[in-house]
């Protein structure tokens, strides 16, 4: 995991928190379509390397995605849209699980499919992820 970014790359967004649930329960929440849909966005994810799926971003429509890593129950990664990679890493801590989300692929020159500069979207999403991972925390506690 290389966190050194070149001059035209913005830093990754990284969110880490300890979830009050065992790793198997967290894995089911982050590696199934139903689980991801409960805390993130509707999707047709399958935990299969190379699997192509879509995330429904509401007003922004469907984003094409592709599974690039799958290592149950420790982690997975997928391409999101044309530039981004999302990585979920899980570490068992007894009855709890440390969860790290990394959202990478931010270029200073880059823009989303909707023409917004990455720098603007990154700031917004950096704040947005805080709430999203809290939703995950609530979901796995149920």
Image (cartoon, helix red, strand yellow):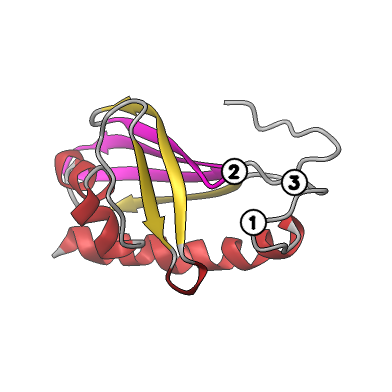
Q: Which of the 4 image quadrants contains residue 52? A: top left
x and y, in percent, of residue 66 in the image? 42, 36
Q: Which of the 4 image quadrants contains residue 105? A: top right
Q: Which residue is mark 1?
A: 113
Decide which of 44, 125 is in the foreground and name it. Answer: 44
In this picture, residue 116 sits left or right of residue 77: right
Residue 20 in sight from this viewpoint: no
- Residue at 25% over, 63% down: 38
* Disc on the earlier residue, 1 or 2: 2
x and y, in percent, of residue 21 in the image? 18, 51
Q: Which residue is mark 3?
A: 10
Residue 60 in sight from this viewpoint: yes
Determine contact: label 1, label 2, CB under 8 Å: yes
- Residue at 63% over, 44% down: 12
Up-down: is 129 above or below 50? below
In this picture, residue 65 sits left or right of residue 109: left
* Disc on the earlier residue, 3 or 1: 3
Q: Which residues are magenta?
A: 74-103
In this picture, residue 126 sits left or right of residue 75: right
Q: Which residue is mark 2?
A: 82
- Give yes or no for residue 94 being in the magenta stretch: yes
Alpha carbon separation for disc pair 1 and 2 = 8 Å
Up-down: is 128 above or below 36? below
């Amino acid at each position: 995991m290389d966190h050194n970014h070149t001059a035209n790359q913005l830093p990754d967004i990284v969110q880490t928190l300890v979830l009050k649930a065992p790793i198997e329960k967290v894995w089911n929440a982050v590696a199934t379509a139903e689980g991801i849909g409960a805390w993130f966005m509707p999707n047709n994810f399958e935990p299969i390397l190379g699997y192509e799926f879509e995330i429904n971003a509401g007003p922004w429509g469907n984003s094409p995605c592709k599974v690039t890593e799958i290592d149950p129950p420790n982690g997975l990664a997928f391409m999101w849209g044309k530039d981004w990679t999302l990585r979920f890493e899980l570490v068992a801590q007894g009855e709890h699980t440390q969860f790290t989300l990394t959202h990478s692929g931010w270029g200073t020159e880059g823009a989303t499919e909707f023409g917004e500069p990455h720098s603007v979207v990154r700031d917004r999403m950096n704040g947005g992820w805080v709430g999203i991972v809290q939703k995950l925390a609530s979901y796995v506690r149920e």
